[in-house]
Amino acid sequence: MRMGLLVLTVLVVASAVVAVMRRKKPDKDFSELSARVRAWWIMAAVFFGAIAVSNRISLIFFALMSFWAMKEFVTLLKTRPADHHALVLTFLAVPIQYLWIALDPPWYGMFIIFIPVYMLLSLPVRMVLSKETRGFVDSASQIQWGLMIFVFGLSHMAYLLTLPTFGQTNANGRTLVLFLVFVVEMSDVLQYIWGKTLGRHKIIPAVSPNKTWEGFIGGITTAMLLSLAIRFLTPFTIPETLLVSLLITVAGFFGGAVMSAVKRDFGVKDFGSVIPGHGGMLDRVDSLCYAAPLFFHYVRYFHVD
Amino acid sequence: MFRDVAQMIAFALVMKPFMTLFIGLRVRGREHLSRSEPFVLVANHSSHLDTISLLSLFPLTRLRRIRPVAAADYFERNKFVSLFTKTVFNILPIARKNITTENNPLRRMRDALQAGDSLIIFPEGTRGSGEQIGEFRSGVAHLIEKMPGVSVIPAYLVNMGRSLPKGEFIPVPFFCEIRIGAPLVLTGSRQEITKALEAAVRELAPETSENAASLEK
């Protein structure tokens, strides 16, 4: 509830700022910014809608996110006709990976090895049966990489949902998902804003010219401070909250950088056109792909017995 | 009547959701389909998804008036397939072999157009690998000769052959795209018309057609 109000406030403020900027500088083009803000309204509504209804619906929502991200990635790959059956298997793996989480109780052992072990071993076997050796290693490794990042990585966010209430707090898996998504996405947005306003020194110009030290430091610091406002969603102490926020925002930064490199390699500007002003699903979940597994394992190691 | 309803139900509940949610079909130039008079929609061919995706562009009420021209020897190979393709896709079956005046494909196509139906034709004559467009056959030119002035709409289909290639039955959800060009009224010799048509379809192809990087701006 409190969380919903906070997000609503942030969105209202963002919309107001864009409206003010438009009036003050009518000659400048704010269409990209306002499209982004509008997209955030929709994404926040869908995300909170899913989380609010039930864990089951959120799980399906996350599975669809993985499915859509994998679709975008695979469409950009140079797949061979001989990969058809391996790709059918790949997309079959998406619902199966989420099925381990949906079981009652969730099957952690299978969740954690299904893609890294069983898919890793079976995909090349399916490809061998197609009898085409040229481009074999390229296809096998690219498809497995996509599965690891967009299905295995993202599914950690869904597994968080299943964690029960922590000790004496009101925090549980569901509130941790809210914490993770809010901090990582706020950090993305704040890095963008800091970078746009103060950005001078580029970090990795060859990969992503928009990432600057000013944006990185400013964005991460403000996101860490903001995370304190939603500490009630977590079982963390104040220093721990700051530490965890630092971990997931830095991880998110590298997730974005890695996905920028992937886009460079494919020669595209963004991964699709699902969300207006935002590129594709991959452009939205790139940071979460990196932040979610680290956050999950931190929580599991230190807070789940 | 039964068939009309069955087709509408199939498209409303299966084909359209499948195209939107599973394939994530994108369409460019949809406005070129808004005219109501009969037209001939012409596209490259690499997959069974070609027909399904093109039909899914039309509103349910208009569906019955769009007839994909299809090889009788393949789509009427047995009773079950025949019933299915006639009901769900409302195909206009034409003979590829043993042509007589009775089953002359041109006559059947002209009759359909004169009755106010529109046609979907794949002038390559068969499904290709999806990597390259095959040479167009002259059927559409013959048809135009019989019915001068009929408007021809070129379309280019991207990635359908990757999603569901020839010989496969389970589709892989690659993003697919339909690119529709402005309607053409073609004149000239058969050869000229065929060439112009092929050029119009090729022109709609993404710049680097080798993979879907081309789907992006």
Image (cartoon, helix red, strand yellow):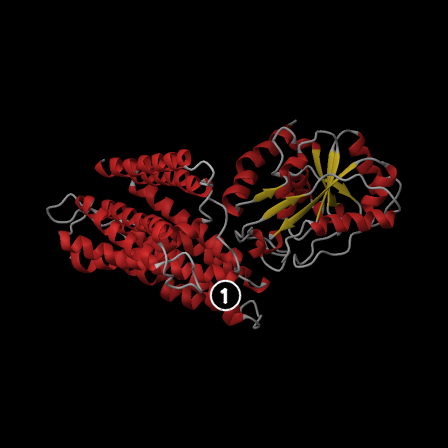
Which chain does tag 1 point to? Answer: A
Give coordinates of residue A240: x percent, y percent.
16, 55
In this view of the protein, which residue sits in the foreground, A162 or A259?
A259
In this view of the protein, which residue sits in the foreground, B98 or A76?
A76
For the question of whether residue B104 can be seen, the reply is no
- Toward which corner of the image does residue A229 lie, by quadrant? top left
* Left or right: residue A277 compared with residue B42: left
Q: Mark 1 = which residue?
A: A126
Above or below for B38 versus B159: above
| The N terminus of chain A: image quadrant | top left
Give coordinates of residue B114: x percent, y percent.
81, 30
Q: Amino acid at mark 1?
A: Arg
* Left or right: residue A127 compared with residue A230: right
Give coordinates of residue A280: x percent, y percent.
46, 49
Above or below for A156 versus B187: below
In this view of the protein, which residue sits in the foreground, B143 or A19?
A19
- At 64% across and 47% down in the image, what residue appears? B50
SS for dot 1: helix
Above or below for A144 versus B17: below
* Left or right: residue B139 compared with residue A40: right
Numbered label tally: 1
- Toward which corner of the image does residue A48 lie, by quadrant? top left
- Toward which corner of the image does residue B32 lie, by quadrant? top right
Q: Report the residue that reaches farthest toward the left.
A: A168
| The C terminus of chain A: image quadrant | bottom left
For the question of whether residue B21 can be seen, the reply is yes
Give coordinates of residue A129: x percent, y percent.
54, 68
In this view of the protein, which residue sits in the foreground, A248 or B110?
A248
Above or below for B119 versus A140: above
